[in-house]
Image (spheres, grey):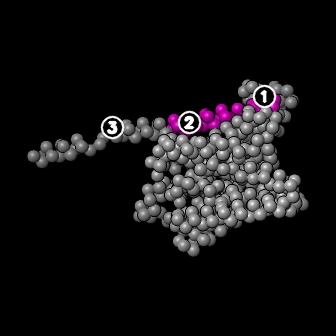
């Protein structure tokens, strides 16, 4: 009798089929990651090729990897004009995608993003104040607006952190403090626009819409360095962030210091957002939509979710940059408008497809 019972128990224990199913799931998620990387590369090539002077993919590749074999005009168009814009679009999208993942993970809220919690509004206020006052750094005038946006974004993070720390760094308090910060900086933005002269107001509004036209080889390395630094800072905590998605109590039970983790990742989010919007202005919906798309493709494992969100954010920004040049050739459509036009319907689609099951 005991032999039959033990045999039955043994037959009920999952064996190789379970292992095979897990391997198939891992292969499928890895395939999603590879596919996203391929789409990312294709859109980067399309963004560089698109513009008033259309180029073929072969011309773009030769201009990048064998510049001596293309006309001088093509080299100038690719290297000095379009390549910095494409690099900036990719970097900003990657930074906002990762920032959105971190925000949603530490707060457990599907609506959390750098835009909805006031970081982007704070950066916009910093830029608006510089444009209004005409202030400029003597040594590097072109860095005045980015530094003001960067500093104000970090200040917004400090405000949210200070209020949350007083109440124990709980997700609810951080969300409420972030929403209050959003309204505070949006009200300050409105005040600056109200007192600005018409020509100054036009410059402020254009910056608040978001634009890639200020991208150059002077500022692309700065955004790349900030994004790389913030990414490296959070890599040792990927397993802790994955555990946090199981719930705060379970994460604490396996040894995760949840308040300290939230504080560290919150600082990383502020750094990513500040670096992303400092040179291009306010960009909405990328940090909100990209994490949801990535989560649908690769699940909650942060080792896959973080790079997938970065690639998805880059895809959205590169696609928006390409579309903005195709819709109105020769004109500059602010990239923030395009991301909103793309992001809102896509967010509705995620809701209709039952995106809440991921939470």
Q: Distance of mark 1 from mark 3, alpha carbons?
A: 52 Å
The residue carrying pointer 2 sits among few (fewer than 14), some (14 to 19) or many (20 or more) residues within 10 Å by Cα, namely some
Identify residue for label 1: 54
Identify residue for label 2: 34
Q: Earlier in the sequence, mark 1 or mark 3?
A: 3
- x, y (%) of residue 333? 76, 41
The residue lying at 22 percent from left, 41 percent from top is: 11
Q: Which residues are magenta?
A: 30-53
Q: Are marks 1 and 2 in contact (CB under 8 Å)?
A: no
Residue 44 on the magenta segment: yes
Q: Name the residue nearer the viewer: 277 or 241.
A: 277
Identify residue for label 3: 17
Q: Name the residue nearer the viewer: 293 or 91.
A: 293
Q: Earlier in the sequence, mark 3 or mark 2?
A: 3
Q: Is residue 56 left or right of residue 287?
A: right
* Helix, strand or loop for the magenta stretch, by majority: helix
Residue 166 on the magenta segment: no
Q: Name the residue nearer the viewer: 220 or 346.
A: 346
Q: Is residue 351 left or right of residue 333?
A: left
């Amino acid at each position: 009798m005991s032999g039959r019972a033990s045999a039955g128990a043994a037959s009920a224990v999952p064996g190789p089929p379970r292992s095979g199913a897990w391997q198939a799931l891992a292969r499928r998620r890895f395939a999603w990651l590879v596919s996203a990387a391929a789409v990312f590369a294709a859109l980067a090539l399309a963004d560089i090729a698109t513009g008033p002077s259309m180029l073929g993919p072969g011309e773009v590749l030769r201009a990048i990897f064998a510049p001596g074999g293309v006309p001088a005009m093509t080299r100038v168009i690719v290297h000095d004009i379009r390549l910095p814009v494409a690099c900036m679009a990719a970097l900003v999208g990657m930074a906002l995608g990762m920032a959105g993942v971190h925000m949603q993970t530490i707060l457990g809220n599907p609506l959390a993003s750098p835009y909805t919690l006031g970081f982007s509004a704070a950066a916009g206020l910093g830029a608006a104040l510089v444009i209004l006052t005409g202030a400029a750094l003597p040594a590097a005038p072109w860095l005045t607006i980015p530094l003001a946006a960067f500093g104000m974004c970090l200040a917004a993070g400090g405000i949210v952190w200070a209020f949350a720390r007083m109440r124990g760094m709980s997700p609810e308090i951080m969300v409420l403090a972030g929403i209050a910060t959003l309204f505070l900086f949006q009200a300050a933005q409105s005040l600056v626009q109200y007192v600005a002269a018409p020509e100054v107001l036009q410059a402020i509004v254009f910056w608040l819409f978001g634009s890639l036209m200020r991208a150059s080889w002077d500022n692309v390395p700065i955004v790349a360095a900030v994004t790389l630094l913030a990414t490296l800072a959070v890599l040792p905590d990927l397993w802790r962030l994955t555990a946090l998605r199981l719930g705060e109590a379970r994460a604490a039970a396996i040894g995760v210091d949840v308040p300290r983790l939230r504080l560290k990742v919150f600082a990383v989010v502020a750094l990513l957002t500040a670096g992303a919007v400092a040179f291009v202005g306010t960009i909405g919906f990328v940090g909100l939509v990209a994490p949801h798309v990535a989560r649908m493709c690769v699940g909650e494992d942060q080792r896959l979710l973080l790079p997938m969100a970065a690639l998805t954010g880059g895809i959205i920004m590169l696609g928006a940059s390409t579309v903005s040049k195709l819709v109105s050739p020769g004109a500059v459509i602010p990239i923030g408008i395009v991301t909103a036009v793309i992001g809102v319907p896509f967010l509705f689609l995620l809701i209709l497809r039952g995106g809440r099951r991921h939470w």
